[in-house]
């Protein structure tokens, strides 16, 4: 059982408080499912980025499985790892799609729980999925410590092929924040460039801008894997639903973290 690592820190520990906070995140948003194949969601504390994330989750369709790509902030575990454990959150437990997980055997993706044990990037997405869809789905959590372009494309292609063969309805979610600890105006400038490449579904453009701008987008590999997988399954367009930064909550615009909600169809 993969126990919650950041409940009580990034989001409330008590189920009733967590549901209340999630309800506030969705306040004023229309729940309207779109034909979404992939998405980018932030993974900061809900007080900072929950409202931005809710813009994606309000539009997500019900799926058999949600494949979650997250960056590895901790450095633990394999370079690219999939978890097959049952995941627990304050709202209940979620099962991994073992059929898809087993299809990764012998690939660049290792079955490795250590990479996931203390990592928050995937965990913080799960209560949003539970709030929208109860427990009526499975997950495939993939953590990328190695985020180079070649790896991201290989992982995205591999997952897309497995999904295609399975015949399942799957949505890919990339967990990423954007610029870290820059003044708000500079953060927005860099993030606009990165978001432009993402909305163009241009993986090479993401890496070109990342290096040219020395951008501190933490989940560029997960974003690129998500775009690769989504395009393989027929995605042709993407849209920015919401952009914000931590300063809009904290009041400190001198060192913000950027957050974006993006959907791929």
Image (spheres, grey):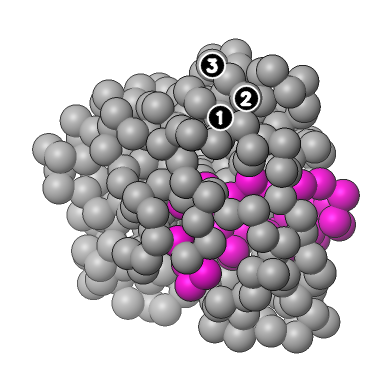
Query: Which residue is pictured at 76% across the width and 55% down the height?
Result: 95
Indicate the secondary structure of the residue bearing disc 3.
helix
Q: CA distance from mark 3 to mark 2?
A: 11 Å
Indicate the secondary structure of the residue bearing disc 1.
helix
Name the foreground residue: 153 vs 20.
153
Q: Which quadrant does the N terminus fall into?
A: bottom right
Name the foreground residue: 216 vs 6.
6
Q: Residues within 10 Å of mark 3 (few under 14, many from 20)?
A: some
**Residue 196 visible from this viewpoint:** no
Marks 1,2: beta carbons within 8 A: yes
Query: Which residue is pictured at 46% across the width and 41% down the height?
Result: 109
Q: Which mark is residue 226?
A: none
Q: Which residue is mark 1?
A: 159
Name the foreground residue: 61 vs 66.
66
Percent coordinates x, y for residue 66 in the rendering: 68, 42
Q: Which residues are magenta?
A: 115-143
Q: Which residue is mark 2?
A: 162
Q: Residue 128, located in which quarter of the rendered image?
A: bottom right
Name the foreground residue: 31 vs 136.
136
Q: Which residue is mark 3?
A: 232
Query: Which residue is pictured at 38% across the width and 78% down the height?
Result: 251
Circle 3 or circle 2, nearest the eye: 2
Query: Which residue is pictured at 60% across the width and 37% down the height?
Result: 172
Indicate the secondary structure of the residue bearing disc 2.
helix
Percent coordinates x, y for residue 62 in the rendering: 81, 39
């Amino acid at each position: 059982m993969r126990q919650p690592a950041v409940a009580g820190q990034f989001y409330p520990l008590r189920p009733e408080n967590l549901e209340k906070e999630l309800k506030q995140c969705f306040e004023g948003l229309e729940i309207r499912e779109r034909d979404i194949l992939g998405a980018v969601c932030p993974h900061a504390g809900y007080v900072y980025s929950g409202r931005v994330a809710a813009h994606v989750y309000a539009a997500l369709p019900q799926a058999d499985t949600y494949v979650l790509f997250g960056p590895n902030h901790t450095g633990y575990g394999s370079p690219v790892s999939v978890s097959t454990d049952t995941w627990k959150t304050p709202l209940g437990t979620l099962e991994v799609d073992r059929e898809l997980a087993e299809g990764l055997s012998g690939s660049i993706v290792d079955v490795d729980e250590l990479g996931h044990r203390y990592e928050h990037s995937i965990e913080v997405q799960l209560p949003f999925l539970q709030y929208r869809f109860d427990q009526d789905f499975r997950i495939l959590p993939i953590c990328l410590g190695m985020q180079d372009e070649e790896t991201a494309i290989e992982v995205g292609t591999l997952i897309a092929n497995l999904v295609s063969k399975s015949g399942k309805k799957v949505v890919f979610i990339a967990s990423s924040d954007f610029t870290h600890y820059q003044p708000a105006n500079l953060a927005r400038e860099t993030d606009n460039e990165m978001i432009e490449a993402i909305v163009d579904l241009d993986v090479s453009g993401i890496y070109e801008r990342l290096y040219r701008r020395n951008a501190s987008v933490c989940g560029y590999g997960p974003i690129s894997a998500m775009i690769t997988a989504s395009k393989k399954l027929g995605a042709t367009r993407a849209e920015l639903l919401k952009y914000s930064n931590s300063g809009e909550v904290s009041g400190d615009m001198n060192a913000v973290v950027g957050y974006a909600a993006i959907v791929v169809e």
